[in-house]
Image (cartoon, helix red, strand yellow):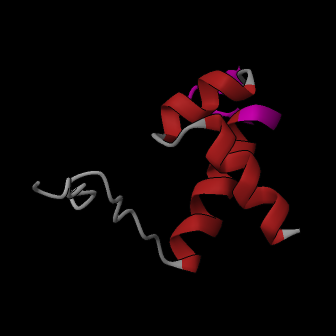
Amino acid sequence: MNPVVSSNSSKNRVKERKIGEVVEKVALWRRFYTGFYDEDGKFINMPLDNAALKVGISKKTLDDYLLQIR
């Protein structure tokens, strides 16, 4: 009888971010949410979900990072 060996090596995530990168991404995410004026003087703000898409990191991850930073 052969033992079943489960290989999780392909499922392991190696998404490590440096602390500085995380702080920058969270700050940018919150800036999109709170709003800012663009070059034309137009005020731009967006919901947290859309801001997370713009930053390129999931909203849940950014929420978790923000909690850790605080």
From this view, report whether residue 59 is shown above or below residue 66.
Answer: above
User: Is residue 9 visible in this depiction of the protein?
Assistant: yes
From this view, report whether residue 3 is shown above or below residue 52.
Answer: below
Image position, residue 49 (x, y; %) = 66, 24
- Front one among 53 and 2: 2
Image position, residue 63 (x, y; %) = 75, 47
Residue at far right of view: 70
From this view, report whether residue 49 is shown above or below residue 69.
Answer: above
Q: Is residue 48 left or right of residue 11?
A: right
Q: Is residue 21 left or right of residue 65?
A: left
User: Is residue 35 visible in this depiction of the protein?
Assistant: no
Image position, residue 16 (x, y; %) = 42, 70
Q: Tell me which segment is drawn in magenta.
A: 33-44
Residue at far left of view: 2
Residue at far front of view: 1
The C terminus appears in which quarter of the rendering? bottom right
The N terminus appears in which quarter of the rendering? bottom left
The part of the image, by quadrant, that contains residue 32 is top right
Residue 56 part of the magenta-drawn span: no
Report how many numbered discs are placed on residues in the image: 0
- Front one among 14 and 23: 14
Could you tell me which residue is drawn at 82 percent across and 36 percent down?
34
- Front one among 46 and 49: 49
- Front one among 7 and 48: 7
Could you tell me which residue is drawn at 51 percent across and 43 percent down?
57
Q: Is residue 9 left or right of residue 66?
A: left
Image position, residue 29 (x, y; %) = 66, 44
Could you tell me which residue is drawn at 58 percent across and 78 percent down?
19
Residue at far bottom of view: 19
From this view, report whether residue 47 is shown above or below residue 65.
Answer: above
